Image (cartoon, rainbow, N blue to C red):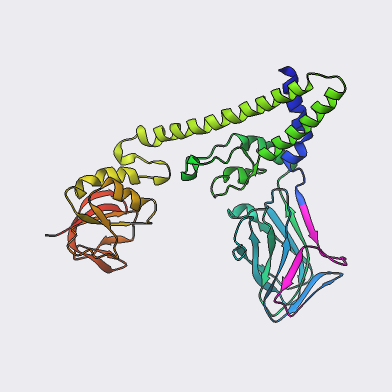
Amino acid sequence: MRNIISLLFGLLVLTAPTVCAAESSTTWNLMNQKQVEGWNANGFDNAQLIDEGFAIKSNAPGQIMKVSKIRHAVDRIGISYITPTGASGQFFWRPKGMDGSEVYQIPLTFEPTVVTQKIILDMSQVSEWDARSDRIGFALDGGIEFVLQSIDFTGPTGGESLTYPFKTFIVLDRARPYSINFLWGPLMTYSKDQYLSLFLQIPPLGDSWNSVFYVIFGAALVIAIALKRFGKTKAITHFFLLFAAIWMIYDLRMGAEFISYAKYDVKTWWSKPLELKDYRDRGSFLAFTEVVQEYTKEKDSYVFIASRGWPYWGTMKYVNWPAIPKRLKDDTEGIDTWLVYQRDDISLDEENRLSIGGEPISPPGQILLNFEPGAFVFRTNP
């Protein structure tokens, strides 16, 4: 077993460049270049490569974009430029998997200057930023003279890049609807900001540890075959023991993720009184459905208004059967029971009618139950 641990540690050291993404800076230099690859410009009246950089002189708006292959975390972007006229527009990026017509963007303003200036974008404060985006560029307004000289992408130090991939290995996702079909598995991040925001958006902004283990397996197999040819008969056995060890690590992590779901449910649902119960991504909604069932008994239908349809609509149809929920746009005449959830914009007007923005949506009545702000049961007067 000691040999297996030593082999695993050695292979992790060999693959450390893959894990820690030690390169923390990338520069796209456009000065003194005869040609540049991966760049594309369109819409401008005149755009060409000169010694000082990529020069744009145009009355029409346009954009300049590069196919990106950045392989490390980036939290600061420095843009070096010259522009006698000043310029404004947007810095944009398209994460992998996003539709070709969609991008994220933030506004940019370049102050007039006849000497090289540099502006810094703090991307650590932009939750949508993804350094692995496959398209990065600028959209600039017309009426400009502008020279783009270089763009610097700077990430965390090598120490952070080495630490956070291992810290992120044990970060577990919460139970979500997709958890019934798949788990993301262990992921890698390279900075504190990435680490703290790992599952704040889906897909998560992290690389898979699978790629590291594939490298380990490949290197171990090559070493094992080579050693076997030199008479080390146990080399193949050691390889399969290594495979089993990593399998067990993955299995333990997956088991911990399942246990974390149950622990979270006990903490937020089973151990709480009804008025404080929260269930996963449903929040207080399931507790709300339990409370309101007594108001829909012996009713043929009721009006249900919520902040969104899914997942609330289907659940209400199920728990209150045979009473049928009606939407606000349906014919609600004669229906006396109204259930409202997560709608802070709905309130009683002076005539005790439910209203949105001052416009009445119901006959006069009274609130029978205030479940929480924006969630209540309303019944019209007989």
Quadrant (top left/top right/bottom left/bottom right) for the C terminus: bottom left
Residue 89 picture quarter: bottom right
Question: Residue 102: image x %, image y %?
Answer: 59, 64
Question: Residue 296: image x %, image y %?
Answer: 21, 49
Q: Could you tell me which residue is drawn at 62 percent across and 63 percent down?
A: 100
The total of numbered circles placed on residues is 0
- Position of 77 with respect to 282 (left or right) is right
Can residue 372 be seen from the camera position used here? no
Is residue 322 part of the magenta span, yes or no? no
Of 330 and 364, which appears nearest the observer?
A: 330
Question: Residue 126: image x %, image y %?
Answer: 60, 55
Question: Residue 115: image x %, image y %?
Answer: 80, 70
Up-down relation of residue 365 to residue 161 (above or below): below
Residue 82 picture quarter: bottom right
Q: Could you tell me which residue is drawn at 79 percent across and 22 percent down?
A: 235
Can residue 64 be seen from the camera position used here? yes
Q: What span is colored magenta in the figure?
A: 26-46
Of 382 and 216, which appears nearest the observer?
A: 216
Quadrant (top left/top right/bottom left/bottom right) for the N terminus: top right
**Residue lying farthest to the left in this orientation:** 382
Up-down relation of residue 249 to residue 305 (above or below): above
Residue 128 picture quarter: bottom right
Q: Could you tell me which residue is drawn at 57 percent across and 46 percent down?
A: 197
Is residue 41 part of the magenta span, yes or no? yes
- Position of 204 with respect to 56 (left or right) is left
